[in-house]
Amino acid sequence: MSFSLRNKLLGMAGASVFAMSIAAPAQAQDDAAAQAQPQRAGVEEIVVTATRSATNLQETPLAITAVTANALTDRAINNIQDVAAIVPNASFAAANASFGRAVQAYIRGIGQYDFNLAFEPGVAFYVDDQYYALLAGSTFDLLDLERVEVLRGPQGTVFGRNAIGGAVNLISKAPDATPSAYVEATVGSYNRTDLRAGFNVPLSENLFFRVSGVSKKRKGYQKLLDFRCDMVRQGTPGLAGRFPSLDPSDGFLSGASQTDCELGRYGGESVVALRGALRYAGTGIDLTLSADYTNDDSPAVANKQLRIVPSAATQALDAAVYQPLWGVSYDSRFLTNSPYTTYATYCDPIPAGTNIAGTYYNGGSDRGGQCFDRKAVIENYGFSGKAVVDLTQDLTLTVLGSYRNVFTTAINDTDGSPLSLQTTKSIITHEQWTVEPRLNYTSPLFDVTAGLFYYKGKGLTTSNVSIPFLNFQQNARISVDSEAKAAYAQAQVRPLDRLQLTAGLRYSEDTKDTLFNNGQGGIIRPVLVKDDRIDYRFGADYKLTDSMMVYGSIASGYRPGAFNPRPFQASQLVPVAAEEMVAYELGFKGDFFDRRLRLNVAGFYSDYSSRIVSQSGSECINNGTTGVCTLAGTQVDPAVTGGNELCRAYNPATDGAVNLAQGIGVACISKTNYVNSPGKVKGFEVELEARPVDGLTFNLAGGYTHFDAPELRNDPLVVNQTPVYVPQWTGSAGIQYEIPVEQLGGSITPRIDGFYQSKISFNSRSPIAQIPGRAVFNGRISYQNDAGDLTVAVGATNLFNKQYYYNIFDLVPFGQPTTEAQPGRPREWYLSVRKSF
């Protein structure tokens, strides 16, 4: 995207001094706030519970974006991944295909891209204040929400689980005393059929019940093509050699031209979810019990092979296996000409038990013939309880408790072909328990929040990695028992009129006890990671007027240590220390012109003294303990003598004789590695909402993040000097105008939204592992019938059909031949009808 277009999105409020800002379109309602109806003429008053007590957004000294369910609907946002598009300096991207249907969440440059249980999320997710530990399966369906609150920067002195990057709290609509119901149906592109419905009913004067459900169906936007059929269709049957067709009709084998070679689709949806809540609201007590269930049986995510770089290892497999069997080689013939097509079948066409001397196929029953079900499954259910008890007029006790169980699969046909050079499959089962008692005391002079938090998690990851060209097979079981204990307290003191001081402390103790078992690879050993930490927050805010506030804070944060969950040999199975950070923030919040304009601005600087960083490369096959090379071969390992972490070809003329101790003339293997490295992050954020005239609403959001780290500047192999998964610029803008139409008994509202993010790198050592900046637009026209509580809307996402990728996964720096990417969704139209009762 051009620099000028980025400036248009970030500068649409350039008519005033305050116009570098974003839309904080939100209304957070609790029972008390719901009684007050906002004035249509101005920006709505907003109440948030991010600080664990109900406060006006404009009087809360934190960088918070709160988004109502209506605002999400207006912008065609129906999953958590897209919420980040309207939050400055946030990126909730779809994970790489090998990680399944997960979200890689980053706020202010800090997050976590790996779904594995070895790591803790850098951004903490909560559903109704209940902590959600697992990144895998975190593509939450935004079901019957009241609002979403996104907090930027370290959180912990009032939150259950420490979060170094930020926190996201999804808040459902609570059962109440007003009977209501709704049903919503949506149809659209790719045979989309969504159905949402729910009702709220009072069972007695104090007892209320609410239930909601959703069913979503949509055909995938990427076609799986039969390779032979497609070669015949393109007039290049010779490229298919003797490779068999997977099309059961076999009608094209005669050489006749084909018009349809489709075998299936990737990137579709098949989701069913249900949630119910029972609430008792009596004198001095408010008790809510809830349960939810999600069954996501969707096809595998869309994934595209961008390039194929044959290596000596793949060419050897060609010569020994693919050429004798079918007369084909693994090369660019398996690249399709569209992001929305692939040849990836998730199948190995060579039957199990096949014995081809000197190759991966050694006659073993577990070598060859494996076909994965082409689905990325998530089954997720949980129970939770929340009790709020008024101990006195000023003192409230809140007790939270929850249980959650997650089953999820992740599969990837990494080579993007029907040959099966590399396939991976992971299955994660995870269950967790949380308990959190909390006290809130409120008085004119000071407020106090204090609580305890306990988390217990048990998880098992089973993975199958098959890489025939490296003669590598791994069937691993990783069992992880996690425990977290914490105590926290925060106080706000008002010693002077308009001045408030904040101080908070947190003590955290985390343990991760792991048993890694890869029997075939000979890696069977425990890994123990333990951390304890004291974190703090100090701040001050001052009300310049009744509608303007300035604030500043300093807060520390940490993320527990981890370990390398994907070792190719025992020497790579090592723990990595915890992350630590101190963040500084200055901000301004203000309403102007009788609340016709709202502007919130924040600047931040984060001293990221220790962060977990992945390093790709290769190393010699070694003894797993001292690191001494054990196998002669055709490579040199410079890391043995203090060089870089990437093996190179052995040249006897310049390298001398084979010397295993010095890494000369050795056999190498891919290497995954995690280290601690410092970093500095700084930037700013602006949020603006304006209603200059009745009916017209304008939103603008912008954020800038600058990340500096020594490994990006000092490593000679680095070609992308930007941190991975972090866009430097983010922006969004939206405008709508509500037009009263008396003849139709309601109004018509057209709306358009634009979302921008600058380029993102996914591997600092790969020039291709970077996606350029992009701007994507959504459009919508809705009709609201006031008397009938009926809404009809027609719209389109990715309005201008922008072709882009969510991510790029380049394995070439690991010594492998592939670079893959996950294509973003093309333009899709939809028609939605909602009836409320």
Image: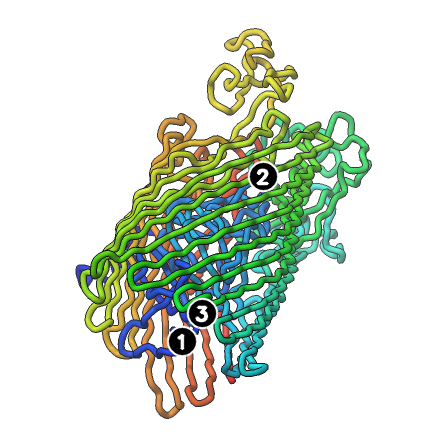
Q: As drawn, is 588 to the left or to the right of 536?
A: left
Dot 1 falls on a residue whose secondary structure is: helix
Q: Earlier in the sequence, mark 3 or mark 1?
A: 1
* Cα separation between marks 3 and 1: 14 Å
Looking at the image, which is closer to me, 136 or 794? 136
Q: Is residue 287 above or below residue 523?
A: below
Dot 2 falls on a residue whose secondary structure is: strand
Dot 3 falls on a residue whose secondary structure is: helix
The kind of residue tagged 3 is Ala
Residue that badge 2 annotates: 512
Q: Is residue 634 above or below residue 820?
A: above
Looking at the image, which is closer to me, 682 or 191? 682
Q: Earlier in the sequence, mark 3 or mark 2?
A: 3
Looking at the image, which is closer to me, 705 or 434? 434
Q: Picture quarter containing residue 702? A: bottom left
| Residue depicted at x 78% and y 26% | 357
Residue that badge 3 annotates: 69
Residue 797 in the image, given as x and y percentages of width and height: 45, 65
The kind of residue tagged 2 is Lys
* Cα separation between marks 3 and 2: 37 Å
Residue that badge 1 annotates: 34
Q: Nearer the viewer, mark 3 or mark 1?
A: 1
